[in-house]
Image (cartoon, grey):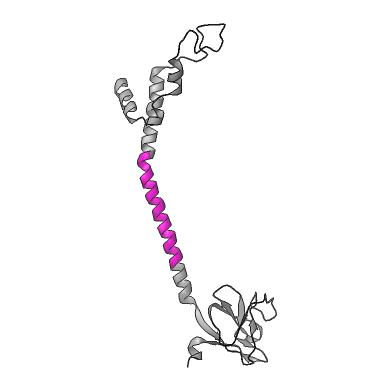
Amino acid sequence: TWHIRVALARSLRPPELSQSPARTKMAGCMACCVTNNDDEPGTTGLKPMDPMKEEEASFSKAVNVAQEREEEPKKMEELKKEEVKKVEAKAEDAKEAKSKTTSWVYTPCNGKRVHIRSEASITSHAPGDCLRADEEFEVTEEKKGDDDVLFLKLADGRGWVFANKPGVGVMCTRLEDYNK
């Protein structure tokens, strides 16, 4: 059975494992070429290799390499499936987010621009961007604030605007109501 295992190991051995470094070193001249000390000819400094153990190790390596090569396409297929699932999930999330958005138009009763707020508050920081009269925009969230002010979160991520302002009146109208 040992001869069969050796033959099998040699047939499965990938090219990179065809010559073991230990076997190559042992092939040298035992009297002087492989010695550690030139004063003591015949000493190799290497332990003699047991051919049985060397072939078993080589066989194990060959089997491991063969198994890895066999499993590689399966792993690649699994990775592809995972990536497809991720892309599909993102597409579904985007579709769901789009279906949850509502269309609005900035329709100020005073004709002025409105500065987009960083938070859902009339007094919160306004970084500088603004909406102009009759500008359409998408909203992902509606939130009631103090004094029954309805705040609208812009779908493009710029921030919040208010649909009505106490003491002023209506500032934003749903697109479906605007077109009537």
- On-image quarter of the N terminus: top left
Tell me where residue 115 sits by quadrant: bottom right
Comparing 135 with 116, the one in front is 135
Tell me where residue 148 sits by quadrant: bottom right
Main secondary structure of the magenta stretch: helix
x then y, percent, for residue 60: 39, 29
Comparing 174 with 21, the one in front is 21
Q: Is residue 73 magenta?
A: yes
Q: Is residue 168 left or right of residue 82?
A: right
x then y, percent, for residue 19: 40, 24
Question: Residue visible at 40% across and 53% down?
Answer: 80
Q: Is residue 40 left or right of residue 57?
A: right
Question: Residue visible at 50% across and 9% down?
Answer: 32
Comparing 68 with 132, the one in front is 132
Q: Is residue 50 magenta?
A: no
Which residues lie in the magenta part? 69-91
Question: Residue visible at 48% across and 76% down?
Answer: 100
x then y, percent, for residue 58: 39, 26
Q: Is residue 160 left or right of residue 180?
A: right
